[in-house]
Structures are given as C-alpha cells and as structure tokens.
Amino acid sequence: MSETKKLPKRDEVPEELTWDLTKIFSDDQAFEEAFKELDEKLKYADSYKGTLENGPEAFLAALEYLLDVSRQLETVYVYSHLKNDQDTSNTTYQALNARAGALATKASEKLSFFEPELLSLSDETIWHYFDEEPRLEIYRHFVEQILSNRSHVLPKEQEALLAGAGEIFEASSNTFSILNNADLVFPVIEDENGEKVQLSHGIYGQLMESTDRSVRENAFKGLYSVYEQFGNTLASTLNSHIKTHNYQAKVRNYQSAREAALSSNHIPESVYDTLVDVVNKNLNLLHRYMALRKRLLQVDQLHMYDVYTPLLGEAPISFTFEQAKDKAFEALAPLGEEYLAVVKKAFDERWVDVVENQGKRSGAYSSGTYDTNPYMLLNWHDTLDHLFTLVHEMGHSVHSYFTQNNQPYVYGDYSIFLAEIASTTNENILTEHLLETEKDPRVRAYVLNHYLDGFKGTIFRQTQFAEFEHFMHTEDAKGTPLTSEFLNKHYGDLNRRYYGDEMEDDPEIHMEWSRIPHFYYNYYVFQYATGFSAASALAQKILTKDPDALDRYLTYLKSGDSDYPIEVMKKAGVDMTKADYIEDAMHVFEERLNELELLVDELEK
C-alpha cells in the first residue's frame, strides 16, 4: 500500500516560504494593542455628529477623523484576515478575524452619520467650505463621489441601522467560506503514479491538468460528489446572500443590485451588457477550440474534466518557485526598471506566502492596505499555470505599491474594475515573452494552448459566471426561489450554450455554481473579463514600443482612486465604454487559435 501524501501543517512550512506579517504587527499582542486603541477612538465618533454644518474647520475635522479611523481599521482587519487565511482551521485566528469583522461593523455604524450629514448640506455650503479652507482641497474628488450618490444615501438613522446589520448581511458568505475552505472533506484518490492523494482545492486544480484521463475523471467526480451532498445547504447560503444584495439595492433606491454594485465605481451598466453581447457573438471561437481539444485528445466524447489538461501530452516546461522568480524578472522587463525594483522588493521582503498547507485558504490573491505591504497568497505547484498566477498576483501587488506610494490615503486604493487590468497585463506580457524566447515547437504549442485556456477561463468562463450571476439576482428579484434544483438546471443550460455541441453534458458540472466563491462578491467576476480585454490592448501598446505607452501605463498604476475608473483607463489609452477593446481581444484569440492549429498540423506530420 502506498502512503497517502499529506499537506504540511502550517508550522512545518519553511519560514522563507511564508509571508512576513511582523511588518504589520510584531506579534499578536501588538495587534491587540492596536485593536484596543481603535476601539477607544471609536468612542469619540459621537462628538463629531451634527458638526458638519458648523463651518469648514469642523467639516475638515470630522472628515479627517473618518479617514483616520478607516485607515487604522484596515490595518487591523488585513492582519486578522491574513492570519486566518494562512490556516483557516486555527481557532485562535478564526476568533481574531471574527473580532476584527465585528469591530469593522461597529466602526461602520459609528461613522454612518457622515454621509447623510454631508448630503444634508447644500452644494453651495459645501463648496463654500472648500473656498474658505485650503486644507480641504485634497478631498474634493472624494466629496464629489459622495455627492454623486445623493439619491441613494438614506437618513442617518437608517444608515446606522444598515451599518449595524453588517455582520448579519455577511453571515451567508462567511458560512460558505468556512464550509468550503475548512469543513468540506474531499475523498482520497490515486494520482497518475498510483499514489494516494487527499483531494483539496489546490490539488484538484493540479489533477485536472493530469494527462491521465482516469485521474481527471476521478478527481472531477470525487470533488462534485461532496458538493452534491451539500447542494441544498449551498443553494441556501447563496440565495440568502443574493437576497442581501437585492434588499440593499432596493432600500437605497436602485433599480437593481447590478446598478447598485456598478454605481459605486461609476461604471455604466452598458459595459456589463456589452461584454456579454460580444462574448456571446464569439462563442463559435470557443466551440472551435473545444473541437480542436477533442481532436487532439483523440476522444470520442469530450467531457468537462478534459478542458484543463494540456493538449499535447505532458508539459514540456515547468518551473520551481525559484525558477519562476527569475522568469518573472525576465518577462516583465518591458515594464521598466521602476517596476522591476518593486518586484525585487516583493521577493526580498517576503510579501509572498508560497506553498499550500493544511487549512490554508484555497486559490491565490493579493491583499494589503495603505500601511502594509501588498501581500500575496499562493498555493504553489511547479507548473506553467502557477508561473502565470505569480505574475498575475504580482501585477496586483505592484499596482497597490505604486498607488500607496503616489497617492494620499484618501485615494490610496483602486477599484476592482481597475485591479484586474494590472494583473492580466502581466499575463499577456509573459505570454509574449515565452512565445518570443521558446523555439521548441512543442513548448510553443504548449504556451499557445495555455494562452487559449487562460483566455477561455478569464473571458469566456468569467462572462459565463457574470451572465449567471445577473440571472440569479434577476430571478430572486422576481421572487423565484433559488433552489439547488433550479440553479442546477439553469447553470447546466448556460454551460451547454457556452461550450457547444462538442462538449458532453456532464451532470456534475450543473453543480459548479455551488463551489464558486466569487458569486458571493457582488458583481465582481465580469471585471476579470473586461480587465483581461483591456490588458490585452495595453500589453500590445507597451510591447510594440509605443513611445508613450509605458508612461501612460505607469500613470494608471499610480492613479488609485484619484479619478473615476473609466476616466483612468481613457488616460491609459483604452476606452472601456466601447466594444472594440473586447473585439480586439477576440481577434488575438482567433489568431493564436489559427497559429496553434497550424503548429499542430506540422507536429502531426
């Protein structure tokens, strides 16, 4: 009997492969002191209530108190959530994170007076304050953003009630997160070497790339067998969370949850609809890619567990984490020395938590705040895909670093709409680098396959998610119960439309909605697809040596929230209110699909 491979415990992971959170707080005691200090500071909130009408100095004092509390709260919360995510089974950090969440709710409730009071003032009064008090000038855009939402901010008593219900509104999302990351136990299966492995989120992704079809099938069916057992529970948590979105939109006088979600960043709903329309018009390209996949895998039936494995057998290229670091430096060189200096800083100062361990949150992300490093969570495996994940998350972290070092705190963050552009620009640049430097036809074909898979996953798949997310919100708004059976049926229908007749209708995939954490993020996923499309345009401008492209790109990375996202991207050279940037990305996909088909023909001769 072969021994089952097990993930290391958190304390068994080498220190150099973990992030250094002592740069936030030296230890948990320092966290507790900051927590207590902030809790005390919240007691002064009432002294600022009712003062915004007392002149420009009082207005400035209340505004700066609001920002000061928010700044300290973000640092406390980031520390607690990073500690929790590194081992979600650790009850000490579960409690720490829960306390930070409760403090955030308390702060939100205490500070909820500000916007209603601001909006009770006339525009004439507010801008008179700005004329009288020069120190207010830096906050002009911040105040303009609040004023633009006048019709959606409630009286201060009602705002306080909504703020106080923050933990309740997040209950379903938190339940899903704990269930998905800590409590679900997946079966043990055999890998391609006959060794027993415990399925996890990270291991599942690795096994779905296996060239052994039985391994892929067993992993696929094994994973979904667990989600099927909890289908009713997961439908309930998702349904409750969507009801929260719809309820909050309704009480704030929005026409829909989507309008509410997009309005916070001043994104026209037409951007969402244009994405879905353009992608649906180009589904024939995805169908054609699935036909190529079926042909190359030499299967009579193409299943959903066949869509991630490399088309040309075992990967002819892989990277250890150390090799990936070197490759990242090489690939990102077109972004200039200023950019590369931050990449070096990220590796040297341990911003990255590298390997998977027991209880660690699945997936990958970049997270931090104005006064912390922009940390990166990975669950590393020595694959090309994880090299792409590294440069993707590095794109987020460098974006955060530049923003925090070039903007005051009030504008020291950026919207999610802008975030995915920085990360996927890096992916596009890495693809170009590999295609320029790798001459082996098998490697080139593998990289092309990887690009097409990434495009499929980022534009086609995320748009599929976006379409389903909007469907769920729309149906709930109509009063339709979002039962597991209902969601299975409609997700299955959507999946068939996206993947076409070449794909078998596997019943397991009807349950995919139940394991997607982004459905709890409130109209988040569409931004992966718009971001990838915009990134494709930006990467082409940078790599074709457009003389102003790099300066415009770095300006975008440094802009933060100092302007509306659509305007920031116009300055960077991409107008995301139009369809052409998505259509251009589709043309790149088609060109690389053509290239792969020709290369495959040559390899088969």
Image (spheres, rainbow, N blue to C red):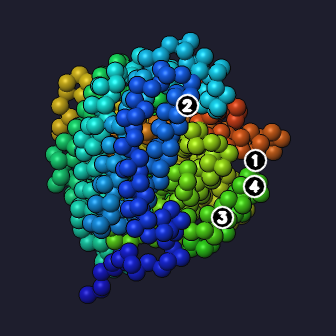
Query: Which is more foreground, mark 1 or mark 3?
Result: 3
For label 4, the SS is helix
Sequence-wise first label, 2 or 4: 2
Q: Amino acid at mark 2?
A: Leu
Number of marks present in the image shown: 4
* Mark in the foreground, 1 or 2: 2
- What x and y, as percent, mark residue 159? 33, 28
Mark 1 in CB contact with mark 4 (< 8 angstroms): no
Mark 1, mark 4: which one is toward the viewer? 4
Q: Residues within 10 Å of mark 4 (few under 14, many from 20)?
A: few
Give the CA separation, mark 2 to mark 3: 36 Å
| Mark 3 crowd level (few <14, some 14–19, many ≥20, 10 Å Cα) | few
Give the spatial CA distance, label 3 vs label 4.
11 Å
For residue 345, which numbered disc appears in the image? 3
**Residue at (70, 35) in percent of width and height:** 572
Task: Name the residue beneath numbered marker 4.
Answer: 338
Q: Are marks 2 and 4 in contact (CB under 8 Å)?
A: no
- Separation of disc 1 and disc 2 at Cα? 45 Å
- In primary-sequence order, the first of circles 2 and 3 is 2
Question: Mark 4 is on which residue type?
Answer: Glu
Residue 132 visible at all: yes
User: Considering the numbered disc 2 on the image, is that residue within a helix, a strand or a loop?
Assistant: helix
Residue to which mark 1 is pinned: 543
Circle 3 sits in a helix, a strand or a loop, which is it?
A: helix
Report if residue 533 is visible in the image.
no
Sort mark 1 into few (<14), some (14-19) or many (20+) by Cα contacts within 10 Å: some
Identity of the residue drawn at 52% across and 51% down: 369
Mark 1 and mark 3: Cα distance apart in space: 24 Å
Disc 2: which residue: 60
